[in-house]
Image: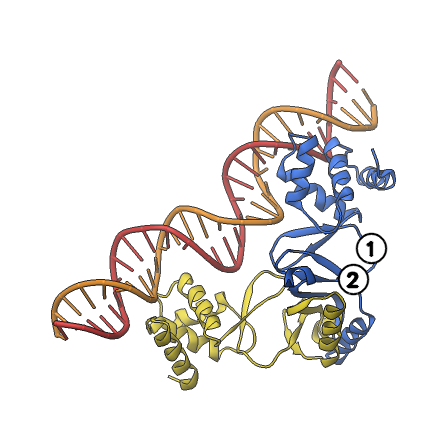
Chain colours: A yellow, B blue, C red, D orange
Amino acid sequence: MAHELEQSALSRYLEKHGLKHTKQREAILEVFLEATGHITSEAIYETVRTTHRHIGFTTVYRTMKLLCEAGLAHERHFDDGITRYEIPHEHHDHLICTRCGKIIEFECRMIESAQDEIAARYGFDLLRHRHELYGHCADCQK
Amino acid sequence: MAHELEQSALSRYLEKHGLKHTKQREAILEVFLEATGHITSEAIYETVRTTHRHIGFTTVYRTMKLLCEAGLAHERHFDDGITRYEIPHEHHDHLICTRCGKIIEFECRMIESAQDEIAARYGFDLLRHRHELYGHCADCQK
DNA sequence: TTTCTATTGAAACCGATTTTCAATTCCAAC
DNA sequence: GTTGGAATTGAAAATCGGTTTCAATAGAAA
């Protein structure tokens, strides 16, 4: 079993909350960490099924929610209505190709401070934002 | 009947597409135009019902879709998953209070050009974007 | 006023996700 | 180890905006 660090972080979280360590949770975390990019619940389900044939959709959904609460995954919602999960890392937004589905992360300090300025202008206490750019990637323009 | 300009724009659109002018369509357009801000289908339904008791949800949904096609309404989707409609006007993004639901429009040239620059950097042909700031408005911070 | 087609409204359906609930599994105490 | 009780699981049903279906109705052209 790889990803010892994350697996033990999960164990600590479960123990701390009186929850149980199960094969399913371990397997789903493993699949999620192995995936590159922004994986969907369905993709996790399909992959985990190859090694644990009995796991149900429900358990994948529930476990991904749990991993989010434990800080081991971040949920993302784009315009197709399908929830995707990322491995948490520093703040960023996304550029999404509407043809091939490619997702690129970007970070822009200037936009971030412009957002703070706009929130301040309207007296808002800014909690979060959603910023997505949709278009056609270089490959899909050919 | 108020909003003669929009009503005749609707009539022109219907005629041009071989569609029919109905009381329901007229009434729904009227309610939509009277509303301030970002109205939901449900709110339109509730309001139109006060004068046209027989109208169904389905017709409201269908008619709002039609008004969007005719350029008389614009659809917006925020994080609560409920479609809202605006009267079309120049490009803008939104600041949304997660306590009271207040929606404020903003426009920022600097962010727009930063977006163009980011898209160019990754070779993207930018088609649209989604930019929403979520927080607590001044009133809700008290 | 006939006729043809578009429209309507109720009800069924959609699809991603959540909830329900009985059966199972974990795990701590014996 | 066994036991017992709470947490977990998976299948099926429910959810929730919104859309589709379909028979009945209503525009509007002849």
Q: Quadrant of residue B35?
A: top right
Amino acid marked by disc 1? His
Per the model, the C-alpha gap separating discs 1 and 2 is 9 Å
Question: In screen coordinates, is A107 left or right of A22?
Answer: right
Task: Report if the CB atoms under discs 1 and 2 are less than 8 Å apart.
Answer: yes
Q: Chain of mark 2?
A: B
Question: In screen coordinates, is B79 left or right of B71?
Answer: left
Question: In screen coordinates, is B136 left or right of B16?
Answer: left
Name the element at disc 1. Answer: loop
Residue A137 locus on image (x, y percent): 71, 73
Quarter placement of the C terminus of chain A: bottom right
Residue that appears at 68% across and 69% down:
A132
Residue that appears at 65% across and 56% down:
B101
Residue that appears at 75% across and 80% down:
B121
Residue C21 locus on image (x, y percent): 31, 51
Residue A108 locus on image (x, y percent): 71, 79
How many numbered marks appear? Answer: 2
> From the viewer's perspective, is residue B86 above or below residue A79?
above
Amino acid marked by disc 2? His
Name the element at disc 2. Answer: loop
Q: Chain of mark 1?
A: B
* Residue at image mark 1: B89
* Residue at image mark 2: B92
Q: Nearer the viewer, residue B106 or A141?
A: B106
Q: Nearer the viewer, residue A43 or B54?
A: B54
> From the viewer's perspective, is residue B79 above or below residue C29?
above
